[in-house]
């Protein structure tokens, strides 16, 4: 049997497993709350692994090892920033958001939480946030489908469109019917597969080389021949470039597909367990990715081989070091990274389309019809994303970095202020949201974006504008104060007694 046949068997087993999990989730889904939020019954371990898997995508297995392989540890600052940002998100946002979204009229989406938290009867904030989610995530989903098509094209010599439709079809199937639970349960399996692959590849490669001392000597020999410094965290970097890389961590506070996992946990107290599991997964995965890049430098230097594309170092090592069936399962880990992100984003897009836009203007529907409307939302977004992804040569993938910055700048400060400052007003939130998104976009499109990542000025602008406008136009609603204190108490803290 050929190597590709073994690898195809592994991919088929993986796909069948994902579809089976989606079917099991379908049987547990009866109303819109189940479809969008799993009925708020998510175990903290599932929330943690799902948040990690839906967050990292193929960047963790391809982009980060490739960057380390090409430039060294100086590229690890983005992983450091993301880990710190994720820890802060779990520590300060997760328990309070879980409590507040239930206290504030059982909000099941971020836009609906903004509306309920700020008592915006005009629906302006909810519509604006829903549109932002829908637009950015449609392109985000499309970029994932492009990545899936290119994965099959490079790994299995398949036509790009064939690969893209395989990824889109399989992901759509378990997300369309399984909803939030389908996306989450598959994320758990996919996150576990990613972690095992990122541990196995560098360890086996290191053993094959002869240990860390031999690997280090090979890395230093490579550095001497090409004039780089792979083992330095600061070589060739400026303070601003390190700040830009670490600032990716700011984006966590505003990513709807990540923080919705916090809202779905059983209790606010589950956040503590979720944080420990989630950050442990993230640290182990990031360290595995970094060492894959470093050991890849040593391995290919010691064997006098060349690697045309640094981002394939993980794939190349797995196919060299393992039996083709195992290598196929490791390839499935890359596919898992792609599909887990797509499924999570499809659910958020569906919720924005149905809960945050249709339910405002449409007539009320019974629970089962709401679920089918949610499925129609998933299908609609997926079809539009597929149409965009038909052109793999477009600039879709360039929008991923901007989407992360855009969500972080538009939503991040508003989430933090909503949870920790009772003085936030609806006009302050709306002004800050718009200002943050505009500044992030304008900065990223200008030459300034080449020096400082746009999330930094966008995040700061949103925070400042939201605070200043809220101080000028203070909220005057007793229910806001009551809900704020109730949410603080439910999250396990004592409410503060100061005013705005």
Image: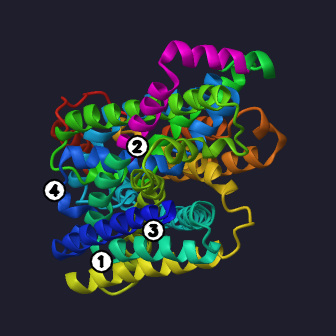
Q: Earlier in the sequence, mark 2 or mark 4?
A: 4
Front tag of 2 and 4:
2
Work out how far the residue at label 1 is from the one at label 4, CA to CA, in angstroms. 18 Å
Of the 4 image quadrants, the one containing the C terminus is top left
Going by the image, does 218 lie left or right of 92? right
Work out how far the residue at label 2 is from the one at label 4, CA to CA, in angstroms. 29 Å
Residue 320 painted magenta: no
Instruction: Give the image quarter of residue 396.
Output: bottom right
Q: Residue at x 58, y 60 (%)?
A: 155
Q: Residue at label 1?
A: 177
Q: Which of marks 2 and 3 is nearer the N terminus?
A: 2
Q: What stretch is highlighted in magenta?
A: 194-222
Q: Tag 2's secondary structure?
A: helix
Percent across and percent down for residue 342 are 46, 63
Q: Tag 4's secondary structure?
A: loop
Percent across and percent down for residue 203 are 42, 30
Q: Residue at label 3?
A: 349
Work out how far the residue at label 2 is from the one at label 1, CA to CA, in angstroms. 29 Å
Q: Residue at label 2?
A: 197
Q: Which residue is drawn at 44% across and 80% down?
A: 379
Going by the image, does 255 lie left or right of 372? right
Structural crowding at the residue carrying mark 3, measured as other residues with C-alpha within 10 Å and reported as few (<14), some (14–19) or many (≥20): many
Q: Which of 266 and 64 is in front in this view?
A: 64
Q: Nearer the viewer, residue 318 or 93?
A: 318
Residue reaching furthest to the right: 447
Structural crowding at the residue carrying mark 4, measured as other residues with C-alpha within 10 Å and reported as few (<14), some (14–19) or many (≥20): some
Q: Which of marks 1 and 3 is nearer the N terminus?
A: 1
Disc assigned to residue 41: 4
**In the rendered picture of this protein, how many numbered marks are placed on residues?**
4
């Amino acid at each position: 049997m050929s190597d590709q046949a073994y690898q195809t068997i592994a991919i088929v087993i993986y796909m069948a497993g994902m579809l089976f999990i989606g079917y099991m989730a379908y049987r547990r889904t009866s109303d819109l709350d189940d479809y969008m939020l799993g009925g708020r019954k998510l175990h903290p371990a599932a929330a943690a692994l799902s948040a990690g898997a839906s967050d990292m995508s193929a960047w963790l297995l391809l982009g980060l090892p490739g960057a380390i392989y090409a430039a060294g540890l100086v590229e690890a600052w983005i992983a450091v920033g993301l880990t710190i940002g994720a820890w802060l998100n779990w520590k300060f946002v997760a328990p309070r958001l879980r409590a507040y979204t239930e206290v504030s009229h059982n909000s099941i989406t971020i836009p609906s939480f903004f509306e309920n938290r700020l008592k915006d009867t005009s629906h302006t904030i909810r519509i604006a946030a829903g549109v932002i989610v829908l637009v950015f995530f449609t392109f985000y989903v499309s970029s994932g489908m492009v990545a899936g098509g290119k994965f099959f094209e490079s790994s299995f010599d398949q036509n790009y469109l064939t690969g893209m439709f395989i990824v889109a079809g399989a992901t759509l199937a378990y997300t369309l019917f399984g909803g939030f639970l389908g996306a989450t349960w598959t994320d758990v399996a996919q996150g576990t597969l990613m972690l095992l692959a990122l541990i196995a590849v560098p360890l086996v490669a290191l053993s094959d080389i002869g240990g860390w001392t031999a690997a280090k000597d090979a890395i230093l020999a490579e550095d001497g021949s090409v004039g780089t410094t792979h083992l330095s965290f600061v070589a060739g970097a400026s303070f601003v470039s390190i700040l830009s890389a670490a600032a990716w961590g700011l984006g966590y506070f505003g990513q709807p597909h990540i923080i919705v996992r916090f809202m779905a946990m059983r209790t606010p107290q589950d956040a503590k367990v979720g944080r420990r599991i989630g950050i442990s997964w993230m640290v182990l995965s990031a360290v595995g990715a970094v060492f894959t890049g470093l050991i890849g430098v040593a391995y290919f230097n010691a064997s006098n081989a060349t690697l045309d594309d640094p981002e394939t170092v993980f794939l190349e090592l797995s196919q060299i070091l393992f039996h083709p069936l195992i290598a196929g399962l490791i390839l499935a880990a890359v596919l898992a990274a792609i599909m887990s992100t797509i499924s999570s984003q499809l659910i958020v897009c569906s919720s924005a389309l149905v809960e945050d836009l249709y339910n405002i203007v449409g007539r009320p529907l019974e629970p089962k019809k709401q679920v089918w409307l949610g499925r129609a939302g998933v299908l609609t977004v997926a079809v539009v994303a597929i149409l965009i992804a038909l052109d793999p040569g477009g600039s879709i993938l360039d929008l991923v970095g901007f989407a992360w910055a855009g969500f972080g700048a538009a939503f991040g400060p508003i989430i933090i202020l909503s949870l920790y400052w009772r003085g936030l007003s609806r006009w302050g939130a709306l002004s800050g949201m718009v200002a943050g998104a505009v500044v992030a976009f304008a900065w990223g499109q200008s030459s300034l974006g080449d020096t400082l990542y746009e999330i930094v000025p966008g995040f700061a602008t949103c925070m400042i504008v939201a605070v200043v406008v809220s101080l000028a136009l203070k909220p005057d609603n007793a229910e806001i104060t009551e809900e704020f204190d109730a949410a603080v108490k439910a999250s396990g803290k004592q409410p503060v007694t100061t005013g705005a």
